[in-house]
Structure formats: structure tokens, C-alpha cells
Amino acid sequence: MDPSRAREILFEASRLRVPKFRHEPEGDKARHTQQEKVHLLECWAVDAARWRSFLEEARLWMDEAVHRLTLEWQALDNWEENLPEGKKAKDATKEVITEAKRKTNPDLFKGLSDGKHLVSQLSGQIRRIEKDEERVSRIYTFITGGA
């Protein structure tokens, strides 16, 4: 899976919302019956499970890509040439080494940075859905009386 597809999944899943049973912002004052509420919650639960599985798969692929890029970053050669004047590799701080490596291979640096950010966003979206699943489960149990 490429990063653009993972981003598509991320943004599509971000539109998943827990059903709302009170007045809608558009002014709809219709009340839902208990059966309608149960149906909406059940549909949402299935959608949530489906989207969470897509997010988990995207995170797995992106995490694997970050792992490969990290290994490439650690094995990067010739970065010492980009150290500041008078600096030696053995005396350089982590920040100085990172900057020298970034100058040596800016595409690798960007790919690694973007990949880590994407993994973080995918993880955040998964956590959001998990929290919503807990809330929906409690609401469902309350509405159905635990049945």
C-alpha cells in the first residue's frame, strides 16, 4: 500500500460519526424510535469495525515502510561530508548528524518523516474509533436494556 492510499483511508475513516438522536443542527426535530436507534447503532458498529480494519492494515503497511526507511537511514553513507566545518562524526550531536544525513539524502529524510507522521495519524484515528466503539456499546446496552 502506498502512502497516498493510506491517506485516503485515513481521511475517509475520519468522516465516520456516531449517530445523533437529538435535534440535528439543520433543525430536524424528529425523534427516533427505539428500533431506529438500535438499527443506527448496529449499522454504525459494523461500519466502525470495517473502517478500523482498513486503518489497521494501512498502519501495518506504513509501519513496515518506516522500518525499512529507518534501516536505510541508519546505513546511510557519506553523510560525514555534510558535517559543519571543523566537526568530526565522533564529536557530533544527534541533531548535527541528522542534519548532515538530511543534506545527504533529503528524499529519504522526508519519506521517513512523512511515514512516521502518517503512522501517528493512523494510530490516532484508530484510537478515536475505539473510544467511539466503547461509547456506542454503552448507549446500545442502555437502549436495549442489556439484551
Image (tube, rainbow, N blue to C red):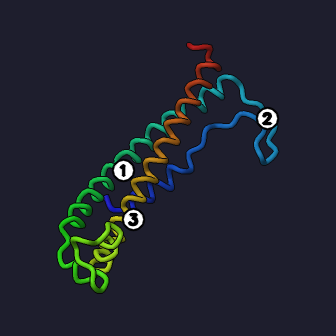
Q: Secondary structure at mark 1?
A: helix
Q: Which of the pair 35/24 is nearer the observer? A: 24
Amino acid at circle 2: Ala
Q: Is residue 43 among what the camera can see?
A: yes
Q: Quadrant location of residue 109?
A: bottom left
* Mark-to-mark CA distance, 2 and 1: 40 Å
Q: Is residue 4 left or right of residue 39?
A: left
Identify the residue under disc 2. Answer: 30
Amino acid at circle 1: Arg
Q: Secondary structure at mark 2?
A: loop
Q: Which of the pair 45/90 is nearer the observer? A: 90
Nearer mark to the viewer, of 1 and 3: 3
Residue at the spot x=59%, y=24% of the render? 138
Residue at the spot x=41%, y=47% of the render? 55
Q: Is residue 92 above or below residue 16?
A: below
Task: State the mark number for residue 59.
Answer: 1
Q: Is residue 32 left or right of residue 18?
A: right
Residue 93: give x, y in percent of width and height.
32, 68
Task: State the mark number for residue 114.
Answer: 3
Amino acid at circle 3: Asp
Q: Quadrant location of residue 31?
A: top right
Nearer the N terminus, badge 2 or badge 1?
2
